Image (cartoon, rainbow, N blue to C red):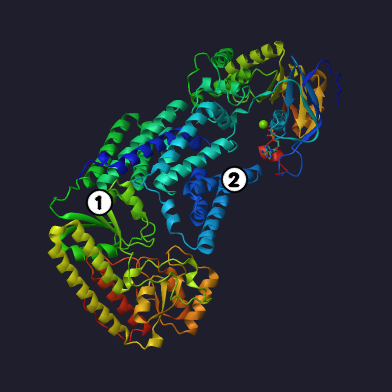
Amino acid sequence: MHDRVLSGEPLVRSNRLAARYPGASVPAISSITFAVEAGQRVALLGPNGGGKSTLFRAITGELAPSSGELELGVGHPALVPQSERSRLDYPVSALDVALMGSVSRLPWWRRPSRADRALARESLRRVGLEDETNTTFGELSGGQRQRVLVARALVQDSPLLLLDEPFAGIDAPSAELLAALFDQLAAEGRGLLMATHDIEQARSWDLVLCCNRVQIAFGDPAQVLTREVIERTYGSSLVPLPGDESLAITPPHHHDHFEADR
Amino acid sequence: MFDPFALPFFQRGIVEILLLASVSGLLGVWIVLRGLAFYAHAVGTAAVPGLVLADGLGFSAIFGAFGAALVMAALIALLLRRRSVGGDSATAIVLAGALALGVILASDVFGSQGSVDRLLFGSLLAIGTPELVLAAVAALAAAAATAILGPRWLAAGFTDRNGNSDSLLIALIALAAVAALAAVGALLATAILVVPAATTRLIIKRLPAWQLTTAALAAAEGVIGMILAYQLNVPPGAAIAVLAGIVFALVAVAVLIHQRRPRLAPLALTLLGLSALAVAGCGSDDGGEASSSKITVAATTTQVGDLVREVGGDAVTVKQILTPNSEAHDYEPRPNDVGAVAASKIVFASGLGLDAWSTKLVKESGSEAEVVDLSSGLPVSHATGEGEAHADEKEGEEHGETDPHWWHDLTNLEAATTEVETALIAADPAAKDQITANADAYRAKIKKVDEQIRACLNKVPANERLIVTDHDAFVYFTERYGVTSKGAVFPSTSTQGQASAGEVAALEKLIREEKVKAIFPESSLNPALAERIASDTGASSDYTLYGDTLGAADSPEGTVLGAEAANAKAMVAGMTGGKERCTIES
Ligand SMILES: Nc1ncnc2c1ncn2[C@@H]1O[C@H](COP(=O)(O)OP(=O)(O)O)[C@@H](O)[C@H]1O
Ligand SMILES: [Mg+2]
């Protein structure tokens, strides 16, 4: 829809990308054309089941594209997964989890070094968890666990961060800390792609990608986030809330609503 | 009784269990963490076809088992590539295939399964150098892999619940399962590999600590299990498995109580622990026997035990290893058995593969006992399958093996009496007169019973002396007394053979055509198939024969002569539809 002229080398770029799960008859996402450059914060909007996590899986290589192109710049992207997938009963401390970030950087025979441990501690400090390094992961609060997962991504020291709904269900202090951290990371020159349900937050970012199984729009939020685009993205009608400038959406009734293909 | 730790076989068992405990600590946590418990169990069990191949082609059983385990691991990995198949389903599919292949190889290609079974039931009391080496290799490999790849395995498991993707981990678990298989058998391997890690998981929340505690717990359970096994005289593998299960239950209960009512937990745990100790203590006051000047000898089977008791009389103490109604083929030694063998001057074996484990038992017990194989030098011998008239008339000679059930021909029993007599006199010359008198009396008794059995069977016209038995254990009996065996429910002389549908159909046809009146189930086998065939054909299956084992120790069938008399009476009654009966005095 909005063909932007890209300056510099993008960290990730796709052209009419589609990806299909093995055994599924139709692609979970298709016609995805976007790019993330260094220093850019890109919001990814879409309903539940709209394919946000699937796009991340395609970018990390977990799911091969079924058609179209996907190009990655230098370095392997670091993923902060949707936290519901991470295991609360896992026998690890916050530091152990952060340290897992170094494993993907190292050749198979190398154990994390002292420097890696120092980096893991430093990353935990950046997410405000320097006092919780030895706490068992499952005993942390939801917001703290999310911050540990962000710290793990920082340890990977990747130019491109993929954030899958990092603000979902976390406490206000954690959210504030992360929001500030993300701005800082972009300022350091990293590219950020973040799935979110918060349209207002998306408005404050550099670019927005709207996706509901197919791409609805990609571009500057000020131009892209029209009522029509948001309606098509969420597949439901918008209701103006009294006393509020912004638009509210009626949430989809059920997650499975969009899983017609399964 | 003597200090078990002084016995070489016990020491080796302890070393083996300590090696396996370290494997359990290192790998058990990954098995639990990555949801691979069923795989770990299956990969050991699926070693069957490898064991059968190794047995049939004559290469090392350990390589056979490990090879089969690796093939299984590769197949599961392949199946998992197709994401539509879940991990446990893939494992179950491959396991079923492996077991089926094992059965087919065993019954249709190689024909014998006896020694394969023995491998599926390994024993901590019969640990030799190969087992120790294997366990040490598994422990070293697990330690090296954990040191290098541990962080990677940890990270992979954290992001991906079904982390079946680490092929090295999968292969290591296969190696560990095979090592545990050799020590405690396939069925109990998980008790060592998985249960300790699952137990400590309930309390320990951090990885290196979890591995260390698991190794320590597995070692403690292993050593205590060995000692309990020794005191209660049960197989150590089973003792360790039960102990591990009890500890798991105790810890789980304690954790539950701790979560509900924290202050009660230590009390409850102490009480449960004490009661467990009390249970253990109850059986342990199994005092030693008063030692006397009598020599001690061991006998492997019930028949040999009876024979040696008859000849030795009061002059010798006989330790009999197999008990009535236990199956010679899948025997697992108990500590007392090994102790008995270690303390014996002579070990009398039945021979011909029936009790092949006895040689290993003697060797691993560190005993200096002389092994007397009573099957050598028998006057009468028959090949397996001889005298068996299968529907397809296949030649029984094809294996060229001698049927091991020699005592069913009483001339053999007489010859064996003389062998026992000679061996006992050589071991205890002072008791010569007594032993000779016993032997003479027994030989006279054998002759008397033999004549009565012949007279009894002669009541049935020769052309009506037709029987179908459970397995071909009676050729010595049928040949001696002119009985025709028309076939067997289980086709091979080993009790492990599986009848195919075609074989059962052929046997039923034969029973109808030849008007066989009775099928004789055997006392130590499951009578289900015999009863099925009997009800299909209208034959009777009411009369039981004593084939591999004698009756209970204090019953008339508890002696060889009593059992043979009972067999004769049962056959006569069965062959005549219950019209003829006879009495035999033994
Ligand atoms: N592992 C999977 N296998 C098959 N289909 C899946 C898988 N994960 C997600 N899907 C399907 O792909 C679609 C997009 O899901 P997802 O990317 O998780 O959406 P979102 O993250 O936007 O909520 C949904 O229809 C979902 O059912
Ligand atoms: Mg998602």
To the question of a shared chain for discs 1 and 2, the answer is yes
Instruction: Judge whether A188 appears above or below B98 on screen.
Output: above
Q: Amino acid at mark 2?
A: Ile
Instruction: Judge whether B43 appears above or below A13 on screen.
Output: below
Is B32 placed left or right of B283 in the picture? right
Q: CA distance from mark 1 to mark 2?
A: 45 Å
Q: Position of residue A91 (x, y in %)?
A: 48, 28
Q: If the image is split into quadrants, where does the N terminus of chain B sit?
A: top left
Indicate the chain on which mark 2 is placed.
Answer: B
| Corner quadrant of residue A45 | top right
Question: Label 2 neighbourhood size at 10 Å, few (<14), some (14-19), many (20+)?
Answer: many
Report whether the residue tagged 2 is closer than 8 Å to ligand 1: no
Q: Are marks 1 and 2 in contact (CB under 8 Å)?
A: no
Is A65 placed left or right of B113 in the picture? right
| Corner quadrant of residue B460 | bottom left
Indicate the chain on which mark 1 is placed.
Answer: B
- Depth order, front residue of A32/B503: B503
Q: Residue at x 65, y 13 (%)?
A: A180
Question: Label 1 neighbourhood size at 10 Å, few (<14), some (14-19), many (20+)?
Answer: many
Q: Residue at x 41, y 87 (%)?
A: B463
Which disc is residue B215 wearing?
none
Q: If the image is split into quadrants, where does the C terminus of chain B sit?
A: bottom left
Q: Position of residue B11 (x, y in %)?
A: 31, 39
| SS state under label 2 | helix
Q: Position of residue A157 (x, y in %)?
A: 65, 17
Q: Which residue is mark 2?
A: B76
| SS state under label 1 | helix
Q: Which residue is mark 1?
A: B340
